[in-house]
């Protein structure tokens, strides 16, 4: 999903199987793991690396599944104005559709019944169909306002290009957990072996997700991913990628995931400014 767009459907694009042959793994690690600091890629590590790459690949969506966010918000605003006008016409004692703080709390979508049926239907609502319709329209207006807030709040995150950094950070995190060095012990440079592994895994992705096409671009992206990964738990990075890969860009995470988000936002903001 591109920046400043929003999902209007959830059809996954067709993703070919992602796999690597034995000779490819052996070439990446070198004889006796020489290319990876003397470490070899165990079957468990290989499985994890492919699993997170498949997870990232699942973020690809068909082009007709998204629409420009600006246009969607404009249409919602227009619908709200028309709904207010309709409510004034069909029931003369309509109340304003105000969004209370309780509808902005975590998991607001689980409280839709409270939005529509916070209290039992009144006698007029039971007697007059238009009074009941007015109540329902009021509830849908409240939902529309909450959804608008969600879309605006998540707009900066919904850039599929940034998912690349989370995926790369997860790959480097898996290597860290396997005891495979990623950074030169005496320099700031990343070691070439893990970067080549990242490049090889990227080559297995759908073409639309192979975003770092040159060696220099890949290396710079790997450095940003390494900084996102540094000091952050693998599970936190994976939780965020798993949710966002589904197109759910809500940012309601607890600690320690919030520290990942904070660093992710800071580093990817710098990337946008340079791009």
Image (cartoon, grey):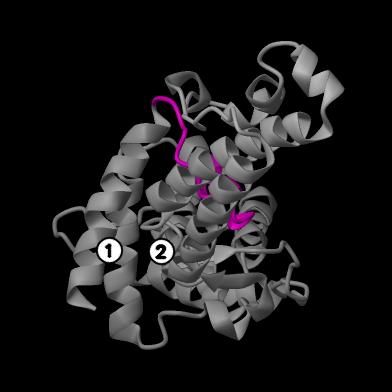
Which quadrant would the C terminus be assigned to in this image? bottom left
Element class at badge 1: helix
- State whether residue 206 is above or below residue 170: below
Residue 235 horizontal side relative to residue 204, left or right? left
- Numbered badge on residue 223: 1
Neighbours of disc 2 within 10 Å: few (<14), some (14-19), many (20+): some
Residue in the picture at 34% in, 85% down: 215
In the image, residue 11 lies in the stretch drawn in magenta: no
- Determine the CA span between mark 2 and mark 1: 14 Å
Which one is earlier in the sequence, the residue at label 2 or at label 1? 2
Residue in the picture at 54% in, 27% down: 95
Residue 92 horizontal side relative to residue 130, left or right? left
Which quadrant would the N terminus be assigned to in this image? bottom right
Residue 141 placement (x, y as % from top left): 57, 41
Q: Which residue is mark 2?
A: 162
Residue 168 horizontal side relative to residue 265, left or right? right
Residue 73 placement (x, y as % from top left): 47, 60
Residue 145 placement (x, y as % from top left): 49, 42
- State whether residue 8 is above or below residue 119: below
Residue 190 horizontal side relative to residue 141, left or right? left
Q: Is 1 in front, or is 196? A: 1
Q: Name which quarter of the figure residue 238 lies in.
A: top right
User: Is residue 152 visible in the rendered structure shown here?
Assistant: yes
Residue 115 placement (x, y as % from top left): 63, 25
Q: Name which quarter of the figure residue 121 lies in.
A: top right
Q: Which residues are magenta?
A: 238-255
Residue in the picture at 35% in, 43% down: 261
């Amino acid at each position: 999903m591109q920046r400043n767009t929003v999902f209007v459907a959830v059809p996954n694009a067709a993703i070919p199987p992602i796999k690597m042959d034995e000779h490819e793994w052996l070439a990446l690690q070198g004889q006796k793991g020489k290319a990876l600091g003397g470490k070899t890629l165990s079957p468990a590590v290989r499985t994890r690396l492919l699993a997170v790459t498949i997870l990232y690949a699942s973020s690809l969506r068909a082009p007709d599944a998204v629409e420009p966010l600006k246009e969607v918000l404009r249409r919602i605003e227009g619908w709200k104005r028309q709904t207010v006008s309709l409510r004034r016409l069909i029931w003369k004692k309509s109340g304003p559709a105000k969004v209370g703080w309780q509808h902005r709390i975590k998991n607001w979508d689980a409280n839709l019944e409270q939005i529509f049926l916070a209290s039992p239907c009144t006698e007029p609502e039971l007697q007059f169909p238009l009074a009941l319709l007015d109540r329902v329209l009021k509830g849908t207006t409240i939902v529309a306002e909450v959804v608008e807030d969600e879309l605006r709040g998540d707009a900066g995150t919904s850039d599929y290009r940034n998912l690349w950094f989370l995926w790369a950070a997860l790959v480097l995190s898996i290597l860290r957990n396997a005891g495979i060095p990623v950074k030169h012990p005496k320099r700031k440079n990343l070691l070439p072996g893990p970067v080549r592994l990242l490049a090889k895994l990227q080559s297995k992705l759908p073409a639309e997700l192979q975003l770092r096409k040159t060696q220099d671009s890949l290396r710079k992206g790997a450095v940003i991913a390494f900084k996102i990964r540094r000091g952050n738990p693998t599970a936190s990075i994976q939780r965020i990628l798993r949710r966002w890969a589904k197109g759910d860009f809500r940012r309601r995470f607890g600690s320690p995931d919030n520290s990942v988000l904070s660093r992710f936002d800071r580093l990817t903001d710098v990337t946008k400014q340079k791009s």
